[in-house]
Image (spheres, grey):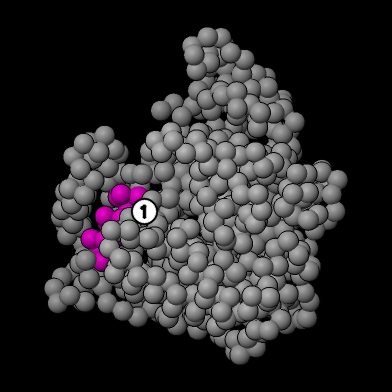
Amino acid sequence: MMGVGTYGYTAPATSKSGGAAAGYDVPEGVEIRGRFDEEFAKILTKEALEFVVELQREFRNRIKYALECRKEAKSRYNEGAVPGFDPATKFIRETNWVCAPVPPAVADRRVEITGPVERKMIINALNSGAKVFMADFEDALSPTWENLMRGQVNLKDAVDGSITFHDKARNRVYKLNDKNTAKLFVRPRGWHLPEAHILIDGEPATGCLVDFGLYFFHNYAAFRQTQGAGFGPFFYLPKMENSREAKIWNCVFERAEKKAGIERGSIRATVLIETLPAVFQMDEILHELRDHSVGLNCGRWDYIFSYVKTFQGHPDRLLPDRFLVGMTQHFMRNYSDLLIRTCHRRGVHAMGGMAAQIPIRDDPAANEAALDLVRKDKLREVKAGHDGTWAAHPGLIPACMEVFTNNMGSNTPNQIQSMRREDASSITEEDLLERPRGVRTLEGLRLNTRVGIRYLAAWLTGTGSVPLYNLMEDAATAEISRVQNWQWIKYGVELDGDGLGVRVGNELFGRVVEEEMQRIEREVGKEKFKKGMYKEACKLFTMQCTAQTLDDFLTLDAYNHIVMHHPRGSSRL
C-alpha cells in the first residue's frame, strides 16, 4: 500500500505487458494514481475529466461544509438532543406545491432490482423482468479502482446496447433482450466517500462526483434517446441527512444539464431516506429537488444503522436483535407511512424497501417459507400505498410483481393519486423516534459478528454484495452488525432473551469473535479461509466494535485497505 505521492509526479508508465505505455491524458491539476488500462482510458478521457474537475471545483467547499454540519449535528445528538422537524421550514411542509410531473418512461416502477455494476449482473438485471435496475456504485460495490472503472465501461456498453458477457466456465454468452429491459438508474457513492485514485488540485476527488460525472458525460445523449424518452439519465441518491445536501445535488444536476445543453429537469433522481435526520426533512428534500425528483425510497437497512448512529450517546435507546427490528416496529412503520404521504402529496413515487432474501435451491421447503415472508412484506407495502419495491435477486421478482400487480392492477402504473394517506398527517416526532422493542440474545451477538467479519473479508477482496445465510448482505446490513455490537459493548447490555442474563463486554465479545472465526473457517473451508482476508477483516471489525468512539462509516476506514496507487506515469500532465 502506497501513500499519496508528490503531486505532478510523471515518471514513465508501464503497461500490463511490461512495455512502455502512455498514461491517461488528463487536464491541468489532475493526477490519476489508479492502474492504467486502455479500456479505462476510453472513460477517463480528457474531456470527461474536465467535466469532473468543473464539478469538483465548483462544489467541493459546499460539500465540505455539509459534512461539517453533519459533525455539528452529531455533537448535539451525543449531548442529548434528538432530531425533529425544523420550525424554520414549516412553511415548506404546510404549503401546497408539487414536484415536476413523473416522466412517462418511469411511471411504472412496481418492482426494482438492485446490484453492483458488474457486467453479468447488469445484463441479468436488465433482463430480469423488473421495471427498474439500480446499478450501484455504493453499498453493493467494493470501490476498488478496477470495480469503479470497469463499472463505468459496463454501464456505457449497457446504455448503447452493446453489452455482452462470455461466461467461460459455463460456455454461455449473455446479452440484452431485444425489448422489455428494465430502466436504468445509477446510484453514485455518498458525499462522504473520497476517490483516492484521482487527485484534483492535490486532494482526493469526491467519489460521487466522479461516479456521476463520468457516467453522465458519456451516456446522457444515448440514454435520453434509448431509455428515457427524452428524459434522463436517472439516479438514486444515498446517505443524505437534510435538504442542504439535496440542494447541492440539485445544483450539480443543473450544472450538468447546462453543460450538455439539455432542458432543465431532464435529470431525475430518487432520494433514499436512509438516515434518521432525513425523515424529518422529506418535504424539504423534495422541495430542493422538485424539478429533478421522481420520489423517495425507504432505505430501511441503512435507516436502522442510522438510528443507532444518531443515538450512540443515548444508553436508553438500545436495539434488540437485528432481525427483530422490522417494519412492524412503531418507528419503522411510521417512517414508511409518512414517506408515502409526503411523496404522494408532492406527486412522486414512494418506493418500498429491500427484500434481501435469495433463493434456497437445496431446500424447497425453506425456499417457499422465505418467499412467503417476501410476499407478506410486499403485501404490507402495496396496501400501505407504496408504488414499488426492491428485490436483491432476480428469483424474487415474479413473487414481488405478482403481489403489486394483484393489488394495484396491471394497468395502473402507480398509486400516487389513489393512496394519499392523509391519515399519516398526524404522525409526530415521538412516533418516528419511539424506542424499538424486543430482546437481545447471545445468538444475535454471534450473528452480527459472523456476518460483519464475512462481509468485510469479501469487501476487502473486491466484492461488495455477498450472499450469507440465505440473505444478500451489503454494506448497510454489515453496518447494522457493527454498530449494534458497538452499542451493546459500550453500554454493557444484558442478554435478556435467552435466559443467560450475562452482560456484553470486551471479554465476552473476544470469546465470541474467537469462536465465530472458528465457525467461519469450518463454513468456508480451510483453504479458502487461508487465502481470504478473514483475519484482516476480523482485526478491523473487532477494532471498530470496541473503539471508544463510533466511526461514522465502516467503509471509511476499510477503504484505506483497498486503495492501490500506481505512481509511475498513471497520468500525463
- Badge 1 amino acid: Pro
In the rendered image, the vertical position of residue 203 relative to residue 16, given as above or below: below
Left or right position of 564 against 61: left
Pinpoint residue 294: horizontal percent, then vertical percent: 70, 65
Q: Which of 162 and 422 is in front in this view?
A: 162
450 in magenta: yes
Q: Residue at x 17, y 75 (%)?
A: 498
Say few, some or many: other residues with alpha carbon within 10 Å of mark 1 (under 14 / 14 to 19 / 20 or more): few
Q: Name the residue under label 1.
A: 467
Pinpoint residue 74: horizontal percent, then vertical percent: 50, 62
Pinpoint residue 490: horizontal percent, then vertical percent: 29, 63
For the stretch drawn in magenta, the main secondary structure is helix
Pinpoint residue 103: horizontal percent, then vertical percent: 76, 63
356 in magenta: no
Q: Which residue is drawn at 41% across and 66% down?
A: 308
Give the magenta-colored segment's residue range: 444-455
The answer to which image quadrant residue 104 occupies is bottom right
